Image (cartoon, grey):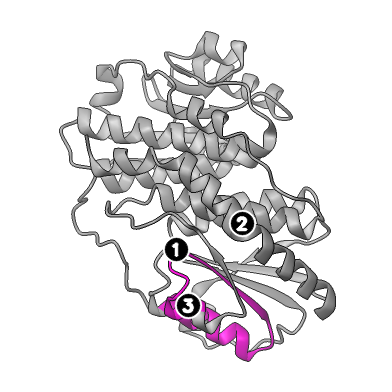
Amino acid sequence: MSIMMQELFEAPFVVEKALESNLSTAKQIADACKTRGIKRVILAGRGSSLHAGIAFKFFLEKQTPYVLSFEYPSMVTLFKAERDLTDSLYIVVSQSGAGPDTLAFAQSAKNQGALTVACTNYPDSALAKVCDFTLHISAGEEKAVAATKTLTGEIVALQVLADALAGKTTTYHLDHVKKALDVALPSFTDKTLTATQMVSLSRGVTEAVAKESGLKLTETCYLFTYASSTNEFQHGPKALIREDLPVIIFAPDGINRDNYVKTATDLNERGAYIVAFTDIDEVKAVAKSVIDMPSLPEDEQTVCYLVAMQKWVATYCETRGLNPDSPRNLNKVTITK
């Protein structure tokens, strides 16, 4: 079993620890936001950490008046932009807390008056020392290059913060996370095993899962994967669809049900080879490969679909004869400036 697979199966423990570690801190941050009169929320992150931010955007905006903006890194590291951030909560997400660019984000934001928060796996890291508060991912050491359990911890920590800003306390049913990890994976066919391209789609709270699947397939399987929301896909990228092109769709039942059914039906009519993570019968009916997901409350769909996807990618990678633990050209900590 790959290290990646071993680590992603630690998800229930990581969820539990990330909840315990951050409930108090998140409440302190929420109180500080009220005291400071915070009006804006900005998040900086790269790779999987940016995808955690996408999940956070949905958690935050659907239940608070705050609008989350994403930092454009070059504005800080290249153009040295001078801004007034005195009314801003500025969150830097980095599993290592060691990248020079993430440190630059945090220091620049603090110098410009922001209330700063580090979301990291290492509370003694340089990033954590710069920031006013630290959300601890609590995932333990992650050895595989491809992030799995650290992303799970990032998402839960940020979800705790979003709930705290809404005056709520986050809860999780850990048995749901375990059920998601235990989903049966169908056998891979030549349509997927010989693929050179894929598309990955979702919307809402699981859009981040689609984005992350694209990254994971690219970095572990060297497979170009276009990932987007189901609706954004209609505006140009739909031209990619051809006979037997594998299209992964993450389609939990809920507010987006009709959209998922319509998207899957259309893809099927155009000949796509649909791989569906879903609990919606109409989507299952048109999919060529089904990962039968449990029915889940909306607040738990992101993490549960994430861990099921990670399991699928790790298995797919090994089935193709690749080692997901050591992707070529990559290191655990990426140094960019």
| Amino acid at the residue labelled 1 | Asn
Tag 1's secondary structure? loop
The residue indicated by pointer 1 is: 121
Q: Residue at x 36, y 44 (%)?
A: 216
Alpha carbon of mark 3 to alpha carbon of mark 1: how far? 11 Å
The numbered disc on residue 158 is 2
User: Looking at this view, is 63 or 7 the one in front?
Assistant: 7
| Structural distance between the alpha carbons of marks 2 and 3 | 16 Å
Residue wearing tag 3: 127
- Residue at 37% x, 33% y is 311
Figure check: 300 above or below 330: above
**Quarter of the view holding residue 242:** top left
Q: Position of residue 48 (x, y in %)?
A: 44, 54
Query: Is residue 170 toward the left or the right of residue 97 in the image?
Result: right
- Residue drawn at 20 percent across, 59 percent down: 329
Label 2 sits on what residue type?
Answer: Leu
Q: What is the crowding at mark 2: few (fewer than 14 residues within 10 Å), some, or many (at least 20)?
A: many
Farthest residue to the top: give it.
285
- The range drawn in magenta is 101-128
Q: Position of residue 236 (x, y in %)?
A: 54, 40
Kind of element beneath mark 2? helix
> What amino acid type should be assigned to the residue bearing mark 3?
Leu
Q: CA distance from mark 2 to mark 1?
A: 13 Å
First in sequence, mark 2 or 1: give its number: 1
